Amino acid sequence: MTTIATVAANFTRDLEQNYQAITDHVARARAQGVDFLVFPEAAIGGYLSSLGNHGDTIKNTTRSLPPAIRLDGPEIARVQSIIGNMVVAIGFCELADDGHTRYNAAAILDGTHVYGTYRKVHQPLGENMSYSSGTDWDVFDTPIGRVGLQICYDKAFPEAARVMALKGAEIIASLSAWPAARTATAENLQDDRWTYRFNLFDTARALDNQVFWIASNQAGTFGSLRYVANAKIVDPGGNILDTTLLDEGMAVADIDIEGTFRTMRAGMFHLRDRRPDAYGLLTETDTDAATGAQWRALAHA
């Protein structure tokens, strides 16, 4: 059995606060024998203060952006000193080698190794004004299995998880800073339409690809954003094994990766039963004039 945990917590620009939160959650996880712990998007340095153009009084400026962190910098080293032999996925703002390009990024690591990194591909509501976009998804061999990483809005795109499943992902960690709806927000955030979508995407992507899905999320508020938490662990059948709901804290579950896959793949196995020959439109790009016209028509429908 492998023990998995995922965090819902609030992370800000205060790096010392972030490190203390990481330390506290790692200590709780270690006490429960956790092998793999997933922190949210932007757990080192916090997320953006606002998204889109909603007339917010809080704007994203160069001064307000998260600190840009190099993979070989002291911030990642500090996290590694905290986590020891525990495998952890964590989000941060990555500074590229050119010294100025920023990515919304995640890494999977332990105290001595960085097993892999990911740069967020899909960018919502003006996020591209603060970050450059990544271009692909990899799957990483780690002590707890083959793990894929994605960030927040990526979960709305089935292709992202499917690419990782086809590359052999057993676990997909989805790190988020997912807020409640900005208009007509539900009084109880658990009933909010954006909370509903967050949870539906998690269960659908797990079931689509028959993988273990681990969703972390920010909690509380930051800038103009009010987060919905709901960190959770979902099995390959789309069943939620544990969730924090709106609370800060950790969801924890024991999973049998090999046994679950062996049983599942003896019956209906979605990856085996795919029909790529029937999916031609999915391989088209909008550089093709006809296809581009289709997308423009859909966008304005």
Image: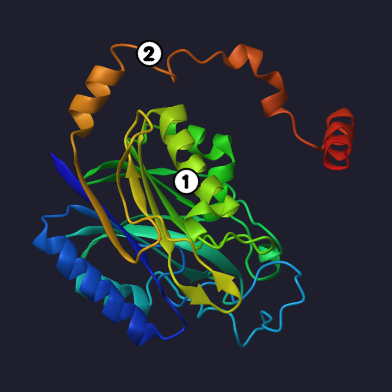
Q: Quadrant of residue 234?
A: top left
Name the N-terminal-most of marks 1 and 2: 1
* Label 1 SS: helix
Image quarter (top left, top right, bottom left or bottom right) of the C terminus? top right
Q: Nearer the viewer, residue 140 or 129?
A: 129
Q: Which residue is mark 1?
A: 199
Residue at 28% over, 12% down: 266
Number of numbered discs visible in the structure rendering? 2
**Circle nearer the viewer, 1 or 2:** 1
Q: At which x and y percent is residue 111? A: 21, 66
Residue 15 shows up from this direction: yes
For residue 138, side relative to residue 301 (left or right): left
Residue at 45% over, 72% down: 220
- Numbered badge on residue 136: none
Q: At which x and y percent is residue 189? A: 51, 60
Residue 166 shows up from this direction: no
Residue at 37% over, 72% down: 72
Give the CA distance from mark 1 to mark 2: 24 Å
Image quarter (top left, top right, bottom left or bottom right) of the N terminus? top left
Crowd around label 2: few <14 · some 14–19 · many ≥20 (10 Å): few
Most distant residue in the front direction: 187
* Label 2 SS: loop
- Is 27 located above or below residue 279 in the figure? below
Q: At which x and y percent is residue 113? A: 25, 60
- Is 76 located above or below residue 3 in the figure? below
For residue 11, side relative to residue 1 (left or right): right
Q: At which x and y percent is residue 45? A: 45, 78
For residue 67, side relative to residue 258 (left or right): right
Q: What is the three-letter code of the residue carrying label 2?
A: Met
Q: Which residue is mark 2?
A: 268
Q: What is the three-letter code of the residue carrying label 1?
A: Asn
- Is 38 located above or below residue 3 in the figure? below
